[in-house]
Image (cartoon, rainbow, N blue to C red):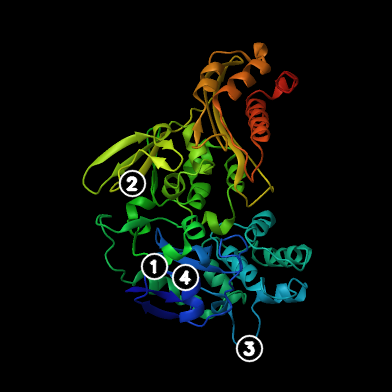
Amino acid sequence: MISFILNDHEVATALPAGTTLLDYVRYDQQLTGTKIGCREGDCGACTVLCGQMEDGRLVYRSVTSCLMALGNASGKHIVTIEGLNIDDSLNFIQEAFASNGATQCGFCTPGFVVSMAGHCLSHAQSSLSQATDAVNGNICRCTGYKSIERAVAVIHDKIKERSEESPIQFGVIENLLPPYFKDIPNRLKNWRVSEGSKMVGLKQILGGGTDLYVQQHDKMEAGDFRFAAEEPSLKTISQLGNICQLGASVTVANIATSPIFQQHFPGLDNYIKLISSTQIRNMATIAGNIVNASPIGDLSIFFLVLDASLVLTDGEQEREVKLKHFFLGYKELAKKKEEWVQYLRFRLPPADSVFNFEKVCKRSWLDIASVNTACLLTVNNNIITSAEISAGGVGPIPFYLQATSKWLLNRSIEELVMGELDDVIQSEVKPISDVRGTAEYKRLLLSQLIKAHLLKAFPAYSNRILSRP
């Protein structure tokens, strides 16, 4: 049985663990305020909140229920738009949307309201840009967004001075949330979830499922899974010396808020914004992104230049594989059928290194890459003393540019011949033409993005870097 708190009520179901949360709340619980839109996690009409205890406090995140397995709701607090209603009146968030003309046909409005409620429940101090980012995974086809931006600004003004430690108490007092929210932390603390597992057995292990439900919806719905999130040790980001270790179920959002990553990757906020939407980042796991083996997987590209390794296990024995050796061919992995990813490990970049991540899509945000690339350079007196470059969209796998990285080694930026560098780049990539662009376009993109890497490391040499070959 799968059990959790749905709004103010405890529920239990024997439905397959792979059933989407969207279908459960609409068809089994008749909570139809959660809308069916794209079923691909793009529109945000099906957004709900997922709350769980983390380090002794209740943390809420917005998620797209069309891509969330019912089994991943076990032991958590799931909130639909109905669970935000206050008797006989609109809550403050709903009133802000109504009074600012931020709703027209109304189909998308529940998702926007739920996303903003999630932002109001954040333990972090709010800024207007963060409040706006909270709805970056919600699409409205009527308003043109300006009225929604006004509503978001009103909500931000309401919460910007609140305490970071008591968002629930503040939310109830200020009419942002119904009173029952105050009891949820104690109810979850006392919640008994069936013992997880040692991640062994014949069942397939599922992370966030954000890509699998798009590609294989019907198959996933009937699936019976084990969930990586059931194992507490797989949710952690830890540091021992200069080695960082991430558990398999660490999400993109966990990376974004990790003090370790924020310290060692100064541009992290900008990189993370290039990866999907808030709701998807709250769900998508590092192991899922890598094992999916997409040639344009953002996290694969990110960690390739950090010389990361994967710890694989079958539940009894472990082995470590370099990420650059993990991808054998299109959707082919150096992984046995019974093995799964337990951890990712990498050496934190030295203080004198420069890391950069670039991504170009058909649209600026919320899209998969035409080409993405990462770079890690160490520079001493304008000489590149170490170089690591990766790229996606230029071959059948997330690609480590070995020849290009080697060519850059020990070269001075003052003597760098961009035409020669481009010849090396083009010699080792094999893009194909597809809906994301022609092969020629992708070659040009990669060339330009590697120039962007060099500009990050050598801003004073823009004329040389941008000179024509």
Tell me how far mark 1 sits from mark 4, CA to CA: 13 Å
Q: Amino acid at mark 4?
A: Leu
| Residue ID for mark 2 | 342
Mark positioned earlier in the residue sequence (3 or 1): 3
**Image location (x, y in percent) of residue 233:** 33, 51
Specify the label residue 21 is tagged with: 4
Q: Amino acid at mark 3?
A: Asp
**Image location (x, y in percent) of residue 225:** 34, 62
Q: Provide the secondary structure element on which disc 1 rests.
A: loop
Task: Name the quarter where the N terminus is drawn.
Answer: bottom left
Q: Report if residue 99 is visible in the image.
A: yes
- Is the residue marked by circle 4 packed among few (<14), some (14-19), or many (20+) residues within 10 Å? many
Mark positioned earlier in the residue sequence (3 or 2): 3
**Nearer the viewer's eye, disc 3 or disc 1?**
1
Q: Residue at x 42, y 37 (%)?
A: 327
Mark positioned earlier in the residue sequence (1 or 4): 4
Q: Residue at x 51, y 36 (%)?
A: 264
| Residue ID for mark 1 | 222
For residue 227, above or below residue 99: above
Tell me how far mark 4 sits from mark 3, CA to CA: 28 Å
**Image location (x, y in percent) of residue 175:** 62, 77
Mark positioned earlier in the residue sequence (4 or 3): 4
**Nearer the viewer's eye, disc 2 or disc 1?**
1
Q: Provide the secondary structure element on which disc 3 rests.
A: loop
| Residue ID for mark 3 | 88
Mark positioned earlier in the residue sequence (2 or 1): 1
Tell me how far mark 3 sits from mark 2, CA to CA: 49 Å
